[in-house]
Amino acid sequence: MTLGTCWLAAVLAAVPVVRAQNAPHLAYVLPAGGQQGTTFQVKTGGQFLPNVSAAYVSGSGVRATVVDYARPMNATQAADLRDRMQALQKQPMTAAVQKEMVDTRVTLLLFNARRLTSPVLAESVTLQITIAPGAAPGKRELRVATPQGLSNPLVFCVGQLPEFTEKESIGVVQPNANQPAQVQISQPPTDMRITLPATVNGRIKPGLPRPQARSGEPFTPGEADRYRFQAHQGQELVIAASARELIPYLADAVPGWFQAVLTLYDANGNELAYDDDYRFHPDPVLHYAVPRDGEYTIEIRDALYRGREDFVYRIAIGELPFVTSAFPLGGRAGAKTKVQLAGWNLPVSKLTMDAKGKAPGIYPLTLQKGKQILNSTVFMADTLPEGFEKEPNNSPSAAQRVKLPIIMNGRIDRPGDWDVFSFQGRAGQAIVAEVYARRLDSPLDSVLKLTDAKGTQLAFNDDYDDPGAGLETHHADSRILTTLPAKGTYYLYLGDAQQKGGPEYAYRLRISAPRPDFDLRVTPSSINVSGGLTVPITVHALRKDGFSGDIALALKGAPKGFTMIGGLLPASQDEVRLTLTVPPQPQPAPLSLSLEGRATIQGREVSRLAVPADDMMQAFAYRHLVPASDLKVAVRRGAMLRVPIKVSSQEPLEIPAGGTARFQVHVPTLPANFAPRVQYELSEPPEGIALRGASPGRDGTEIVLACDAAKAKPGLRGNLIVNISAERVAQAANGAPPANRQRVSLGTLPAVPFEIVARQTQ
């Protein structure tokens, strides 16, 4: 069986290998949202942003257009300004000369402050945003496009409250009018008057340089922004900051994310309330009952007094509805469930969640006060029978008897409380006990313990690492998968690891036989590729309850000309790299793609759509598959000269353990200004597999792969991704030495499926 003939249109223009790394990257957007029915400008900062041609906001009702681009001053321009400063100092000190010297000095000081800024923050693009009056409120995703492709998505919010944005300014301090070269600059913190209710937007900017700083104090601390407002006696104010949820990962920052702190003051500067987080959420929330009419001030700063261009925030302030907890946290799919609510400024204390027609999963649960929606909680629908925990049940003698399978809804309703459930089991029976609490916005940090009737501990779990839990840095839910040793009564204990409790410490506890299943993530969420070329992507399997089978992958409803090679995620593996080939015609706008996985589980076929995601890092430590709303593909314009490349091999290519295997690549003759030799390189190969060589022959180039038997064992399957390149030589003038060679990417081959097989002995 052959892989077939795959055609790759490779660009042979001046495209350095690093070009793929120059896709636009967005680091922040300020303001990070706006009110329905308004038009305003935002500033996006990042890297590789020249020639931004378009901007896109997910969903409907929001339009973005490009206004301006700005690049920071470079070292050559700064040197020119220093020369100008020296020339000015030799001139008579007129008012005009003094003003120019002050302006030049300020510009140079700002340059010195910002040249240490990370390159990922250095460039900026101004966009004009128009939000329709009927645009749905909530989080969207903002991307920009350049000739190099589509950027990563950033959170952009559609709000309902009037919006205020801080006015950034630079103050000039000139202690001696006769010595303008000694001018200093100050960056006064925001001190703005607003009216409630409101959403305020700003950022905590970095400190500026001290011209005559002592050792270890080269910069001033990051700023603190303040907003003043009138409030009235009896108002129940809610002040909710969004910072980490806007930009949750700062891979190049130390110690990482923006750690926002809120402080409320009265008119005399007395501190009234303070918060640096809300339960386990890193963004702070304040609730304050106003004791008397007057002026109040809310301050926001970084907990460590830092500042960065991307320390962006939004603060909602007013007598706003805010849900603090819900019970139960879920119910039966296809049925209606009454949910009790707790919180501040709520119009009702109960609502009904209608799960009719909903598949099992987690859904938003929102509450409106008039037209206002501030926060929302979540609701989990499932197909298993539902039950409710009943007190007292905090010991084996008082254990609540349950019949499996079941989902128990309960609370750890006081500090030190344990909920104990008993059930009958048989020898060899596999069971799963899994808590859903933190993943459903409960503060519970659960612990699970399983014992037999004699009290012998059989299993224990504190934290279960769920790779599908988005941006969680503390996976606080518990899970046990075990096999019962004998027939008899078993006891399952559920408590809080920190010995905390209360009415908001709710949970859902599933006790059942394993339900093998899987979810999929596909990375990256923004794919950039020239027309006709091939690009690698990665599919991640989130396997559940012991499912370890093959997963067949395919595009679903893809436009004509899009093909995928290597669409198999092998058994027991959690990810696979495969390739996507796009049609040769460039597309005027990014396209949305869908990818589907199918597997046979317990005799039935199961299909799951892959959720687009980005593999991100937080503070050099935590890696996450961060979901996105769409899998976007930007098909760029290719060069006029295209080279078709044909690849053929067995499917899969069998590589003997400890031996070698070969396949053919057909590359036509390159133009005269290219060196004749084409270079082939494996991209992120499995351990133990190496490219031994590439030998030109009559039928094309033969690629030789070698397998180290000590590192790659028989049965290993997957895809091999091969990048190819060549050297281009610029034409030299007559008699001149040969010009420097430039390595040029010819693209990526379609994925080559492989399998390691046992080496045959003679």
Image (cartoon, rainbow, N blue to C red):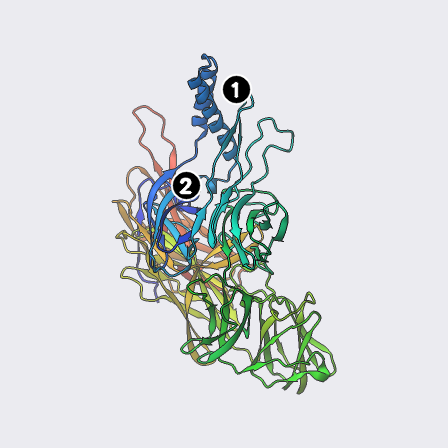
Q: Report if residue 395 is visible in the image.
A: yes
Q: Seen in the image, is 714 located left or right of residue 676?
A: right
Query: Which residue bears the numbered disc 1?
Result: 177
Up-down relation of residue 68 to residue 404 (above or below): above
Whether residue 597 sits left or right of residue 261 in the image: it is: left
Q: Residue shown at 41%/41% (left/top)? A: 124
Residue at x 54%, y 22% (from the top left corner)? 182
- Which residue is rendered at x = 46% and y = 21% of the image? 101
Marks counted in the figure total 2
Where residue 536 appears, x then y in whole percent?
Answer: 40, 55
- Residue 479 at x, y percent in the picture: 60, 71
Quadrant hosting residue 41: top left
Q: Point out residue 714 in the picture as x, y percentages from the top left corner.
A: 51, 66
Dot 2 amino acid type: Ser
Residue 549 in view, yes or no: no
| Residue nearest the viewer, comparing 9 with 333 | 333
Name the mark nearer the viewer: 1 or 2.
1
Front residue of this view, candidates 259 and 640 = 259
Label 1 to label 2: alpha-carbon separation: 34 Å
Q: Residues within 10 Å of mark 2 (few under 14, many from 20)?
A: many
Q: Is residue 723 above or below residue 613?
A: above
Q: Tell me which amino acid carries mark 1.
A: Ala
Q: Secondary structure at mark 2?
A: strand
Residue beneath label 2, please? Answer: 124
- Nearest to the observer: residue 60 or residue 460: 60
- Residue 350 at what x, y percent from top left? 51, 74
Q: Quarter holding the N terminus? A: bottom left
